[in-house]
Image (spheres, helix red, strand yellow):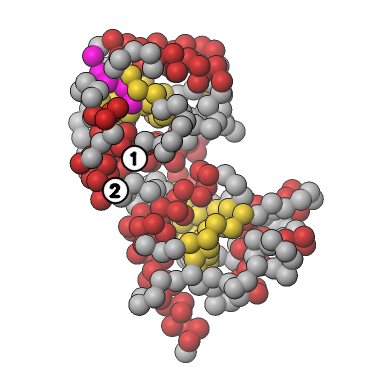
Amino acid sequence: MTDAPRVWILGDGRIGHAVPMIGVAERAGWPYEMRQVAPRKPFELLAPFGPIDPAEAPGRADSPLAPPYPDICMASGRRTIPYLRHLKCVSPCTFTVLFRMPRTARTGADLIVVPEHDGFTAPNAITVPVLPHRFSPDRLGAARAAPPSALEGLPKPRVAVLIGGDSRHHTFTPDDIARLTAGLNNLAESGAGLMVTLSRRTPEPLADAITALGKAETVYVWDGTGENPLTAILALSDALVVTADSTNMVGEAAATGAPIHLFHPSGGHPKITRAYEILGRAANIRPFPGPLDGTAYPPIDTTADVLAEIEARFAAHRARNSA
């Protein structure tokens, strides 16, 4: 393609849904617009089967579907499906991509990108062991070559600690918090350097317990100010401790090729368990708390593969429409 396509990323405000699409756009070097749907009830409740909220129709002020329409629209989330379907009706030339398993056959998507653990197959679908992410080898390499001083001075082995939070299927109980923090404290006392980031979903008691660990000289906890150093944390990690509430987060950890030590808070879901079983075929996944263990493996990155599929199908789509 000589000119970059006009790209929309259509979301419902959940950053975990947006990140894989942002990763694809960044890897391609495509400028993109973030478009966010916010349907009112009952339209929110009717998604993905019902229509869009008329208040967000393309002709309305501040509509997420306001033209000019894009060449490519990537969407993720149940609430976005009626909007993707509507966009396909008003702009058939737009190539549409839906990330994650749809709950209806009427998605309006030309291509569906589905995690393998969802078990969904269709002629217009591709499956991946983990969803795309923003951590390309070049980006990690650049961070490794010029690390922040706060991280560079930590002792080795350096352990990335990615803390999530309460979710639809997981809850951090007081016992979970005590078990996780005790395991991290043991790592710090063993001489490892810990590089910790929290999530916006991290419950306050867990955040307080983790922040208290940051008083040790060998523990860095990002305080939420300035730019998130996650790229550098991943790039410098010799091993990782990751909470199991986010398959996206564990997939990002696998981009490093370093052993992953997975902490399971209370709860769970069979699909999430299956996701980690699938990832464990290629990545080295260990339980946590427990000793650092395991060998490196080739970094897992589906972003380039998904991008290549989108580019090939978009080119064929555009050729059909110009014939």
Q: Amino acid at mark 2?
A: Arg
Picture quarter with the N terminus: bottom left
Look at the picture and state if 277 lies above or below 98. above
Magenta segment: does it hold 192? yes
Q: Position of residue 181 (x, y in %)?
A: 42, 14
Q: Which mark is residue 139?
A: 2
- Residue under label 1: 231
Q: Is residue 52 visible?
A: yes
186 inside magenta stretch: no
Q: Say left or right for 180 vs 260.
A: right
Q: How many marks?
A: 2
Residue 250 location (% of width, % of height)? 39, 36
Classify mark 1: residues with Cα within 10 Å, few (<14), some (14-19) or many (20+): some
Determine the main secondary structure of the stretch shown in magenta: strand
Gap in angstroms between the C-alphas marked 2 and 1: 8 Å
Front residue of 206 and 84: 206
Residue in the image at 31% along x and 42% along y: 255
Disc with the residue nearer the chain's start (2 vs 1): 2
Name the foreground residue: 203 vs 129: 203
The residues colored magenta run 191-195
- Location of residue 105 (image quadrant): bottom right
Q: Using the image as rendered, state which of residue 164 and residue 148 is in the foreground.
A: 148
Tell me the amino acid under the disc marked 1: Thr
**Residue depicted at x 23% and y 29%:** 152
**Residue 306 seen:** no
User: Does 175 appear above or below 142?
Assistant: above
Task: Choose between 321 and 202: the one closer to the eye.
Answer: 202
* Label 2 with label 1: CB-CB less than 8 Å: yes
Q: Residue at position x 56%, y 20% from top?
A: 204
Q: Residues within 10 Å of mark 2 (few under 14, many from 20)?
A: few
Label 2 residue SS: helix
